């Protein structure tokens, strides 16, 4: 009994009153204070980023909609797009095509050119006036000629074919000239109609894996502070863990001599489809013109191959697509504008043609392309606005 009393006294002395584990309410108060401080700091950062204009948040919804054979653009959109490291505005007209501003396009009131293509023609990463179509439109305005950009990011040949036919059937008057802008991706994936994508809140997502990307998109379009931290992390990664601007393996596969498109029957199928589009354009008393754009990835592959730095990869040929397009135009009697020599010269001189971390043409490159197209297409050049027609000819054997 005496021993138990002694132990009880020692126990009481070893844990003084008020000492030991803090009350739960104290920890909750501290965590609440920390959380409140973080929220206040994020709020101040959010307000500061918006006031300074570093991130001007727009609507959460994107600028695309379900339609056509896969997807199209919404009408009368005003959207600020934020990519890591750059931002740009997208406006669409009442026709659902990219424009300098939303609202009525006025297309058809005077002569106009229609431009078909994919993301490099749409002008990913650039405000409309800085895209090469915007630069061309600015030049052509001096001649009282409009330019309408029917291109859409990610589209391939068959999707743009459908977009043009739908537009031509509803237009007040057909275009005078139709520019068919070709590149290796647009040609090589000509029959890919993006059946595996769905449009949610105006953006494209994989039909089965869309929830997490959608959540990230909502955050990126709602919170400037999210974009701030996202860009900071990615810039740090780029600084200390540098990588290539784009995966060259993608271009090796696209230019591969074993690519499915290189099969003679596949190549001829594309040629037949291109010819049907050409005939449709001529049936409208419009003039088809083909424009070829190379990829920056193709230039990099050729450069690395010349330096002997590419080993144990499948054989590739970066000239196949441009030669295909050029031979087709020669047989069909179509004006062919090849931007590859110009861009190759710029690349060889050390100029950067694309955005950092992205293979699309940057602003300076797009300005040069726009001026180059104008020099080839301005109305004083061989009366280019005069329509042309010709008797049908057998499609060329290009295999």
Image (tube, rainbow, N blue to C red):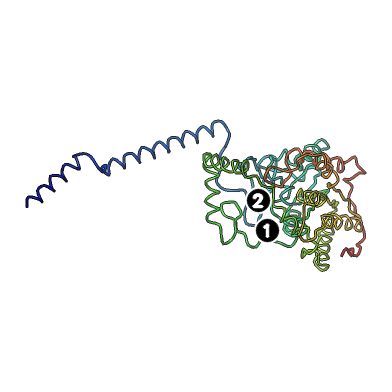
Instruction: Please report the residue visible at 21 percent of the width from the left and 39 percent of the height from the top.
Output: 18
Within 10 angstroms of label 1, few (less than 14), some, or many (20 or more) residues?
A: few
294 or 268, which is in the foreground?
Answer: 294
348 or 183, which is in the foreground?
Answer: 348
Q: Position of residue 360 (x, y in %)?
A: 72, 46
Which label number is shown at residue 397? none
Left or right of 54 on screen, residue 14: left
Q: Residue furthest front?
A: 3
Q: Secondary structure at mark 1?
A: loop
Q: Residue furthest top?
A: 52
Left or right of 223 on screen, residue 65: right
Q: Quadrant of residue 271?
A: bottom right
Q: Position of residue 22 (x, y in %)?
A: 26, 42
Within 10 angstroms of label 2, few (less than 14), some, or many (20 or more) residues?
A: many
Q: Position of residue 102 (x, y in %)?
A: 65, 42
Q: Position of residue 124 (x, y in %)?
A: 69, 45
**Mark 1 sits on what residue?**
68
Q: CA distance from mark 1 to mark 2?
A: 10 Å
Q: Secondary structure at mark 2?
A: strand
Left or right of 217 on screen, residue 340: right
**Mark 2 sits on what residue?**
73
233 or 20, which is in the foreground?
Answer: 20
The answer to whether residue 362 is above or below residue 271 is above
Instruction: Please report the residue visible at 54 percent of the width from the left and 49 percent of the height from the top.
Output: 216
Q: Residue furthest bottom?
A: 265
């Amino acid at each position: 009994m005496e021993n138990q009393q002694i132990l009880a006294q020692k126990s009481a002395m070893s844990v003084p009153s008020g000492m030991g584990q803090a009350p739960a309410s104290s920890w909750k108060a501290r965590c609440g204070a920390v959380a409140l401080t973080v929220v206040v700091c994020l709020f101040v950062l959010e307000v500061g980023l918006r006031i300074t204009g570093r991130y001007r948040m727009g609507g959460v919804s994107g600028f695309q909609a379900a339609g056509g054979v896969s997807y199209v653009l919404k009408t009368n959109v005003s959207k600020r797009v934020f990519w890591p490291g750059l931002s740009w505005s997208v406006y669409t007209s009442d026709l659902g095509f990219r424009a300098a501003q939303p609202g009525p396009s006025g297309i058809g009131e005077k002569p106009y050119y229609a431009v078909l293509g994919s993301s490099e023609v749409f002008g990913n990463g650039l405000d409309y006036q800085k895209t090469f179509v915007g630069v061309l439109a600015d030049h052509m305005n001096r001649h009282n000629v409009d330019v309408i950009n029917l291109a859409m990011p990610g589209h391939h040949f068959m999707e743009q074919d459908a977009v043009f036919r739908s537009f031509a059937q509803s237009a007040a008057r057909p275009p005078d000239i139709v520019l068919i802008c070709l590149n290796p991706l647009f040609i090589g994936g000509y029959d890919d109609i993006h059946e595996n994508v769905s449009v949610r809140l105006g953006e494209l997502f994989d039909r089965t894996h869309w929830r997490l990307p959608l959540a990230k998109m909502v955050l990126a379009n709602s919170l400037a502070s999210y974009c701030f931290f996202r860009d900071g992390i990615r810039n740090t990664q780029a600084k200390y863990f540098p990588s290539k601007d784009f995966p060259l393996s993608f271009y090796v596969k696209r230019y591969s001599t074993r690519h499915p498109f290189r099969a003679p029957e596949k190549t001829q199928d594309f040629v037949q489809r291109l010819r049907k589009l050409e005939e449709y354009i001529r049936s409208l008393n419009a003039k088809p013109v083909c424009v070829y754009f190379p990829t920056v990835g193709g230039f990099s592959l050729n450069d690395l191959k010349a330096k002997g730095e590419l080993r144990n990869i499948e054989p590739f040929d970066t000239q196949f697509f441009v030669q295909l397009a050029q031979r087709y135009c020669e047989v069909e009697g179509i004006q062919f504008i090849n931007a590859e020599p110009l861009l190759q010269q710029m690349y060889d001189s050390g100029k950067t043609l694309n955005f950092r971390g992205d293979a699309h043409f940057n602003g300076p490159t797009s300005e040069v392309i726009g001026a180059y197209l104008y020099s080839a297409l301005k109305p004083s050049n061989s009366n280019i606005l005069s329509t042309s027609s010709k008797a049908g000819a057998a499609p060329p054997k290009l295999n």
